[in-house]
Image (spheres, coloured by chain):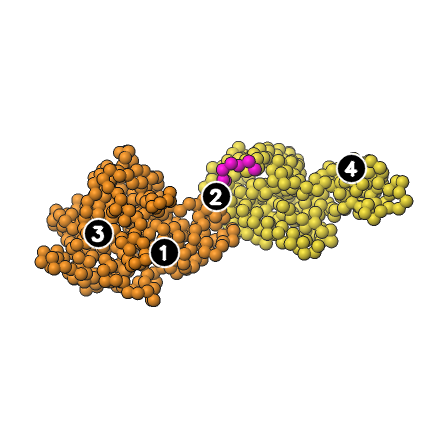
């Protein structure tokens, strides 16, 4: 079950080279990405309408793609421009073309009604392009789990204390109560931890010494994009509604999950920080540590998916699941509404 | 609930087998069962006022009901418990006899095994208090207060034990209470019979006739700062609670526990007057602001405690143990049936509820409610 009228990340921009056919899979649909001669990326259904050979096994011909089986050729709108040996091109010789847009170095594909595709609806990244902020470009990974286990995970600050003991977590994370805020576009689970030791991952980067007040802000917006904010201020200067201390450490972690299908998820991320914008070494360290932590998540979530798919006894929902389950429920409502609209339109 | 001490109900002992070692007829309708755990290490100390939760089989099925019976013996006798049970016959034709009490009276003999959990409950004697104590009971509601009286007899606190019932024929544990009262100075008893018999009059078994009234209590209680403990059927409770509040006794000085099936609790305007033979003092109007929560299957009713976090927490305070998991309105584990009344949700349930369903963990009663628990 997927929300379709929204943008999903299909690839990093740099992953699609000139003169390269890049097959990707989103929401169970096979799509081929390629660059036209002007460098603009196009996204087409990755199956020739003749015998369904993936077009990604064919060739790029100028701005078009030629099927590697019998040479049927399609332009970037999916219209067939050539059927070798046929007198006329049948109207039904057509592949679906997907709206695609580049933003933040990522390629975003609109999976729903093309008429509704509006690049302004792409996830907003605060401070993007702000010279005071540093960015560490992320990577991507594929998880063998349903994307909703990822949205669960990113609305679940509690897991940090157990899954990421060596990095983001510290014992303070176990005790402080969580708040859940249900918004128009998603759910946020957050908490302030007052006067705690900074977690090992962040400690070297703090401008102040001693204990800190730490905010965890875990926000996931529909369908499956998350911003995780880490805020550290000197002890007893933080708290909800207070203006942030001048030595505040801010790290915004952006997480974009694309359902490959019901059982696999492609995960893209990058982080923004409010200091050392040009220090490559810090970006490198951040990227490495984050990758390490996400690998820890991957191991757990893959096993959770398997465990839940094969469960022989019932599973529990706990108080910590409030945010994740509210998110799932509201997303399910959006999906149901979309399907109803679709059914009504047919 | 509403006892002076901190909640003691957090203990969860699990069910264990108790062997009936003695069955003692206490009055024409009340019988005591002396119980010893089959595994002697299974005995748990208890605070006077606490109860055991019994698993009573339903005849002709594998099903059972849970019933709470207060421990009526002294807490100072390790290894055994005593419960004192009134046989609840059908109040009118067409209504079944009290399933559990009749089962115990009619089918349980010495040597039989009962299955129970506990003791538990937060209606317990505050042993740290130095204040004088007033124990007020109606009918078979005296059982937890007798246990308290045992404990108090070993102290030097002043105690007034007031008991109301129909007459000497149904007055249980009378000799025991009188013996305790005679054990030291400062222990006073007062028995108030609604329908005394000739024999009662001849033997001088009671001290007053009628029901417990404002005037009666006024005469018995010199002005002082007392700890009050109330237990009895709901009309008695409502009447006495009202009188005490009328005296200006602060709420936190009145600990109480309802007793018996709660179906008799709040007489609806159209209900017929109680038959004269009903062994409870006459009903008095409930406090106008009282919100009652009835747990029908458990046969318990209590005044809603506005400080309770939720119906789930309140049920647990009352000694019930409904299933739960998230305690946040999302998992549905604590879903129960609302027999009557309304609740308000302070946390919107994740799943829509069918009519008559209630999620205990995230709701509070809106006026009196009856739950199928």
> Residue under circle 4?
A53
Q: Is residue A91 visible?
A: yes
Which comes sooner in the sequence, label 1 or label 3?
3
Left or right position of A346 against B141:
right
Task: Tell us which disc is closer to us: 2 or 1.
Answer: 1
Labels 3, 4: front one: 3
* Residues at marks 3 and 4, CA–CA distance in whole angstroms: 88 Å
- What residue occupies the far bottom of the structure in this picture? B270
User: Are the residues flagged by discs 1 and 4 in contact, CB closer than 8 Å?
Assistant: no
Residue annotated with mark 1: B293
Q: Is residue A313 magenta?
A: yes
Give the class, few, some or many, for how many residues have Cα within 10 Å of label 4's Cα (few <14, many ≥20). some
Q: Which mark is residue B263?
A: none
Residue under the point 28% across and 47% down: B103
Residue ID at (45%, 52%): B359
Looking at the picture, tell me which residue is in the foreground, A135 or A28.
A28
In the image, the segment drawn in magenta is A309-319
- Who's yellow, chain-wise? A
Q: Which residue is mark 2?
A: A318
In primary-sequence order, the first of circles 2 and 4 is 4
Image position of B317 (left or right of B326): left
Q: Which residue is disc 3 drawn over?
A: B29
């Amino acid at each position: 079950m997927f929300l379709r009228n929204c943008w999903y990340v299909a690839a990093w921009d740099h992953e699609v080279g000139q003169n390269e056919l890049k097959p990707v899979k989103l929401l169970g649909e096979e799509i081929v990405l390629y660059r036209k001669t002007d460098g603009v990326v196009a996204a087409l259904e990755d199956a020739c309408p003749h015998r369904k050979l993936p077009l990604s096994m064919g060739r790029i011909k100028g701005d078009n793609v030629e099927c590697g089986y019998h040479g049927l050729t399609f332009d970037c709108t999916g219209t067939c421009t050539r059927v070798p040996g046929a007198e006329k091109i049948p109207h039904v010789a057509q592949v679906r073309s997907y709206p695609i847009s580049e933003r933040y170095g990522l390629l975003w594909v609109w999976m729903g009604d093309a008429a509704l595709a509006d690049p302004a609806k792409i996830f907003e990244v605060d401070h993007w392009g702000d010279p005071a902020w540093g960015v560490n470009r992320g990577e991507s990974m594929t998880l063998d789990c349903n994307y909703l286990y990822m949205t669960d995970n990113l609305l679940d600050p509690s897991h940090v204390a157990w899954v990421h003991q060596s990095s983001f977590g510290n014992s303070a994370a176990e005790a402080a109560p969580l708040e859940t805020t249900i918004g128009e576009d998603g759910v946020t689970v957050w908490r302030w931890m007052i006067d705690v030791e900074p977690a090992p991952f962040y400690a070297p980067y703090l401008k102040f010494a001693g204990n800190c007040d730490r905010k965890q802000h875990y926000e996931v917006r529909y369908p499956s994009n998350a911003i995780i904010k880490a805020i550290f201020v000197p002890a007893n200067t933080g708290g909800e509604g207070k203006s942030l201390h001048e030595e505040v450490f801010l790290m915004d972690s952006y997480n974009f999950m694309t359902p490959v299908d019901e059982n696999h998820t492609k995960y893209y991320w990058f982080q923004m920080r409010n200091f050392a914008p040009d220090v490559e070494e810090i970006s490198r360290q951040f990227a490495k540590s984050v990758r390490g932590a996400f690998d820890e998540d991957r191991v757990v979530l893959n096993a959770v998916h398997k465990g839940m798919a094969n469960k022989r006894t019932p599973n529990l929902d706990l108080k910590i699941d409030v945010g994740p389950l509210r998110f799932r429920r509201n997303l399910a409502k959006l999906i149901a509404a979309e399907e109803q609209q679709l059914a009504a339109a047919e | 609930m509403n006892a002076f001490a901190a909640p003691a109900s957090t203990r969860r002992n699990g069910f264990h087998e108790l062997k009936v070692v003695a069955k003692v007829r206490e009055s024409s309708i009340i019988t005591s069962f002396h119980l010893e755990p089959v595994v002697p290490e299974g005995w748990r100390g208890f605070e006077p006022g606490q109860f055991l939760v019994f698993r009573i089989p339903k005849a002709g099925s594998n099903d059972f009901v849970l019933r709470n019976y207060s421990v009526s013996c002294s807490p100072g006798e390790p290894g055994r418990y005593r419960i004192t049970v009134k046989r609840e016959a059908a109040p009118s034709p067409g209504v079944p006899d009290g399933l559990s009490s009749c089962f115990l009276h009619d089918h349980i003999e010495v040597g039989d095994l009962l299955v129970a959990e506990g003791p538990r409950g937060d209606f317990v004697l505050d042993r740290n208090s130095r204040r004088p104590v007033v124990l007020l009971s109606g009918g078979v509601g005296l059982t937890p207060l007798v246990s308290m009286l045992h404990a108090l007899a070993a102290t030097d606190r002043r105690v007034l034990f007031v008991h109301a019932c129909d007459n000497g024929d149904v007055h249980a544990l009378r000799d025991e209470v009188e013996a305790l009262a005679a054990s030291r100075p400062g222990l006073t008893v007062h028995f108030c019979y609604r329908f005394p018999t000739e024999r009662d009059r001849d033997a001088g078994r009671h001290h007053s006739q009628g029901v417990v009234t404002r005037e009666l209590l006024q005469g018995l209680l010199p002005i002082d700062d007392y700890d009050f403990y109330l237990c009895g059927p709901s009309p008695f409770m409502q009447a006495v609670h009202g009188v005490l509040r009328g005296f200006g006794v602060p709420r936190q000085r009145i600990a109480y526990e309802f007793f018996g099936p709660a179906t008799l609790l709040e007489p609806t305007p159209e209900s017929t007057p109680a038959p004269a033979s009903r062994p409870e003092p006459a009903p008095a109007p409930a406090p106008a602001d009282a919100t009652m929560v009835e747990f029908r299957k458990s046969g318990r009713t209590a005044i809603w405690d506005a400080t309770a976090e939720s119906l789930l927490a309140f049920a647990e305070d009352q000694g019930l143990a409904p299933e739960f998991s998230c305690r946040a309105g999302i998992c549905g584990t604590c879903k129960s049936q609302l027999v009557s009344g309304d609740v308000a949700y302070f946390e919107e349930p994740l799943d829509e509820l069918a009519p008559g369903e209630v999620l205990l963990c995230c709701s509070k009663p809106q006026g009196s409610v009856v739950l199928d628990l």
